[in-house]
Every structure is written in C-alpha cells, then in structure tokens.
Image (cartoon, helix red, strand yellow):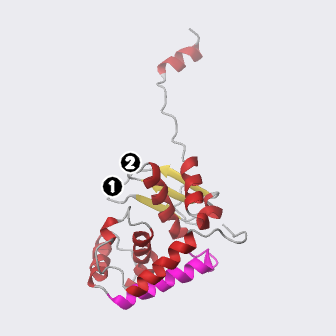
Amino acid sequence: MGIFDAMAAATPNAAPAEDFGPVIAGVAKAYPRLAPYMSNAVVRRGQTADDRQLEYYAPWASDNPNPGKSTMEIYNKDLQGDDLRDAVALDMLHHLGGVKPDGTPVDPAYFALKQKMTDAIMAANKPMDRDAYQEDLKKYPDSGSYEQWMAHNRADAYIRGYVNPRLNPEWQHPGIYTQPMQATGNRIREYLMTPPTQDVAK
C-alpha cells in the first residue's frame, strides 16, 4: 500500500456537502419577484446558541461569511423541502426591503409597501409589539430605537406571517392584522408573485 493509499484509508469518507441549488431555484420559481436576486444568494447550514431559525446577511454586511452575496444561514435542522424553500424566501425579504450602502432601496416598490405596513403597525400601537421590543432589547441590546426595530425587524415578522401563514401559525390569531395591514399584506403577496418587468440591480 502506497503512502497515498494509506492516507485515503485512514481518512473517513466525508459526508457530501448539502446542495442548496434546488432550494434557490425553488424560491425563484415560487416567488418570481425574488428570482433576480437568487442568482447572487448563498444558502448554508449553521449553528446558533439561541432559538433563531435562520439568519440573513446582506451582501455588504461586514460579518457576512460570503461577502458580496445575500447569505441565508439555516439553524433549524428540521427545515426541509417546501418549508426550507419558503423560509429562505421569507428571509430574502430582508434584502428586497433593504437599503444599499449608498442609501437607495434595493427594490423601491417593495420598500414602499414595507413602509406602508410599518406605518399600519405603528398606527395600531399594539401592546404586544411594545412587549416584544422590550424582550428583544434584553437579548439584543443593539436593537436600536423602537422605530428602528419596527422598520428593520418587526415589520418583516408581520409580513412573513401574512405571506406564509403555514410557516407562521403564531401570527394567525384573530385581531393581529388590522384592515390596513391586511390590505397591504395582500398587495405584498401579489407583488412577490409578479415577475419583474425589467432587469434589476442585485
């Protein structure tokens, strides 16, 4: 047995890397508005010490493990199939509703819809939102002001709950969505299912 044969025999077979290509393609098909951005997206498994399901990193984030690309790190090992596809799609809404380093929205039309949802949530002034903010401050002291937290965190949670009730049953209790929220939520659903009419910057 040669030295290379011996090294091969001593090295256990590594598990093949998980292929997330079908997940990315599935998101682009199920949510056409996200399709242009999925070609610049990376999905990978990760670990966390808290109860997060997954984490999104913007292409320009300093802590992004894949600089220049939208990165979704999956912590919930049970997310598979359609659940994984939809969870990745809903996390990509952070990118769609985000702002580039130069201050311009990634997708101005979606950014406006997200702002409309944020305004409706703020107008409702629900105690559950104030309570959730205080809880997040304990876990994440850098959450910012209530208004910042609402725009960068809570509005996304409301939108995810409305767009995909199956993955977000905790958001389906009566009275959570006011009529203005429902009207905007319906527009967001329709927008995500509509292919872009022209090339967009990723």
Visible in this render: residue 66? no
Query: Magenta stretch?
Result: 98-125
Does the magenta segment cover residue 101? yes
User: For the view shown, which residue lies furthest in the bottom direction?
Assistant: 123
User: The residue under label 1 is which amino acid type?
Assistant: Ala
Secondary structure at badge 1 equals loop
In percent of width and height, residue 3 lies at 57, 14
The residue depicted at 54 percent of the width and 20 percent of the height is 8
In percent of width and height, residue 98 lies at 55, 74
In terms of secondary structure, what is the magenta stretch mainly?
A: helix
Does the magenta segment cover residue 16? no
User: The residue under label 2 is which amino acid type?
Assistant: Lys
Q: Quadrant of the N terminus?
A: top right
- Image quadrant assignment for residue 39: bottom right
Q: Going by the image, does 178 lie left or right of 95?
A: left
Visible in this render: residue 29? yes
Camera-side residue of 109 and 129 = 109
Report the residue marked by disc 1: 49
The residue depicted at 38 percent of the width and 58 percent of the height is 53
The residue depicted at 59 percent of the width and 17 percent of the height is 4
In percent of width and height, residue 11 lies at 49, 23
Q: Are marks 2 and 1 in contact (CB under 8 Å)?
A: no
Report the residue marked by disc 2: 77
Local packing at callout 2 (Cα closer than 10 Å; few below 14, some 14-19, many 20+) is: few
